[in-house]
Image (spheres, grey):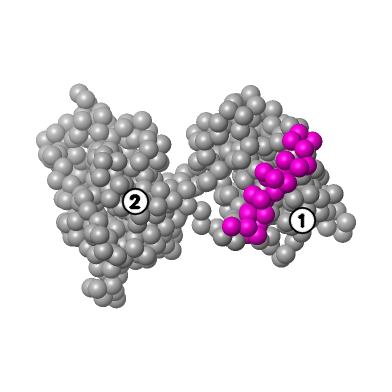
Amino acid sequence: MEAYGSCRRSSLSSVDNKASTIPIYRSAPELEVRLEDFEIYAVQRLRVLKGISDGLSRGKKPNEMKILVKELWDAHMSHSLDAHMSHSEASEVTNKDIISHFVLRLVYCREEELRRWFLSMETTLFRYRFLIETVDAQRALLAEFELPYKVVNNVEYESVKDKLNQVLRSTGQSPSSDTAYYKVPFEQVPDLVGSRRVFILKGFAYVAMNQVVSLLVTQYRSYLSKALVLTNRKWTSMIREQEKDRLTPIVEALSTSYFGPDYSQPKDSTTVSLKDIDQLAKSSFPLCMRHLFEKLREDHHLKHGGRMQLGLFLKGVGLNLDDALAFWKAEFSRKVGAEKFDKEYAYSIRHNYGKEGKRTDYTPYSCQKIISSTPGVGDHHGCPYRHFSEENLRAALCMMGVGNRAVENVMDKVRNKHYQLACTLTFEAVHGTSCDAGINHPNQYYSDSRKALESRASTKGA
């Protein structure tokens, strides 16, 4: 993206997206964007993409995904364009759509893994937005792509009609003489070929009009993939340095954004007693925190990353400052001595509680931040679902009481890099209850665990 002005607003340069209510995002918009909107729009679109990611990882069916995408879009992007919306309102909504896409393109262009995720989610969003649209809007978008394919003529249609109808019947559809077909190279519709929803002859697939979204998705994915690589080149060569004091911090923070409660203070002013902490670690800590806690007890020491991750988590579950100092000192003194602890480590604990330095009330780390961390040799922080070997992860899950079948389900999610869903499945297996919202924060895991265990105890006592 070529340019953001040096004033308090960011400018994004020319767009031609008037043919359809779904933009193709060929070029950045020529608009003045306030920095506040720059971030707000990106966060709102990110909520949509993360909702899509969760739906896909949970195995939702196409019809369910179609409903989910519409709900997410209406809730976060307010893109319900109707006859009662004024021209200025419609323009504002469309601008929000385009701006948010280009901001996130900057955010997710910077690393291969980020690019892959963004490409997959935006492509899925494009697919279901197309399916939700009216027929007229679909045709407008189809024309905008300027695909070099012609509709199969009557003579050719008659020669393959029986085969085409056979394919339709095999997919549960009724044949119709009104159906138009496009003849395209089969490699351009891999999803249709893979699911045997098209007839193939001499290297060409016969794509029905109601399947044309697959053709558009392939084209869109190819275009966006190339655009992300180009954006990354501009980011690394020019934009990052030019905007290091203004946009760069926003862009770099958005890829690890967390949108839930910050858990800087325990809910309902709940406190945790030192005498109960070992039992709570065993029953209600998520695997990432349980692992850190056990390593601390075992080695009587944690490196900085581990101290921060576990220390802020304990603060969030209700361990007060005095007890935190006593807890860490009891462990570290066994290795480094009480005097060295007081000189080198106590300050950072008080700092986390907002009692030193800038007096900032630091918040516990979210799952996204933990997953994105890169622990080094001798470190124990980070996400076990991402960083553990398969053997170590299986052993850790068994120690938590996760059954064999559930372990396999967790491992399947890990292989597909759905780490938060793997943690969610672990929670459900350990507690015997569903967690529809998914696990997004270690302190959420703890809070939901306490509720589940208290509910189970009250049921038994009734």
Residue type of the residue flagged with mark 2: Lys
- Give the x, y percent position of residue 410: 60, 35
- Give the x, y percent position of residue 447: 69, 54
Badge number at residue 244: 2
> Which of disc 1 and disc 2 is earlier in sequence?
2
Any part of residue 287 in sight = no
Q: Examine the residues drawn in magenta and state their main secondary structure.
A: helix
- As for residue 339 lying within the magenta part, the answer is yes
Spatial separation of the CA atoms under disc 2 and disc 1? 39 Å
Residue type of the residue flagged with mark 1: Asp
Residue at 56% across, 49% down: 366
Question: Camera-side residue: 132 or 7?
Answer: 7
Question: Camera-side residue: 82 or 339?
Answer: 339
- Give the x, y percent position of residue 272: 78, 55
Could you tell whether 412 is left or right of 152 in the image?
right
Residue at 19% across, 60% down: 30
Q: Is residue 353 placed above or below 193 in the rendered structure?
A: below
- As for residue 349 lying within the magenta part, the answer is yes
Q: Is residue 371 placed above or below 142 in the rendered structure?
A: above
- Stretch of the chain drawn in magenta: 334-357
